[in-house]
Image: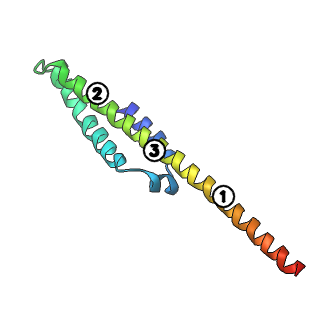
Amino acid sequence: MSEIAISISFLISQIDHRTLACTSKLLPIAALTTLLSALAARPLLARWLDGRELNPNFFYAATVALGAGQLLAIYDVAAAALQAEAEEREAGVGAACVQRAWRRHAAREKSE
């Protein structure tokens, strides 16, 4: 569980309001998958090793689901961060174009 907590805390530290606004519907699904598989992994491991009741494939499936949830969350946050950066860059370019047009318009008015 400590590895899961550290990876999630690193991921959460990179999220701000702009990034969160750009995330898709995958982030809640990834969070739910990570949470459920993390909760299921420990009892499955105990039943497999201590109880010798379950097949190891159950624990393996829980760890695969855990990795898939974390990968999906990282993918969605990284894509949202890139999208937010691109939107910010486009907004800056648009503002520069508006400023240039306004300066040209003001220069024309002064010359007339």
> Cβ–Cβ below 8 Å for labels 2 and 3?
no
Quadrant in which the N terminus is drawn: top left
Name the outermost residue toward the front.
Answer: 112
Q: Which marked residue is nearer to the observer: mark 2 or mark 3?
A: 3
Query: What amino acid is at disc 1?
Result: Gly
Which residue is found at the position 19% from the left and 21% from the top? 57
Residue 63 has which mark? 2
Q: CA distance from mark 2 to mark 1?
A: 43 Å
Residue 80: percent from left, percent from top: 48, 47
Which residue is found at the position 81% from the left and 76% from the top? 106
Q: CA distance from mark 2 to mark 3?
A: 21 Å
Which residue is denoted by mark 3 in the rendering?
77
Quadrant in which the C terminus is drawn: bottom right
Within 10 angstroms of label 1, few (less than 14), some, or many (20 or more) residues?
few
Query: What amino acid is at disc 2?
Result: Thr
Residue 92 has which mark? 1
Name the outermost residue toward the left.
Answer: 53
Residue 90: percent from left, percent from top: 61, 55
Query: What amino acid is at disc 3?
Result: Val
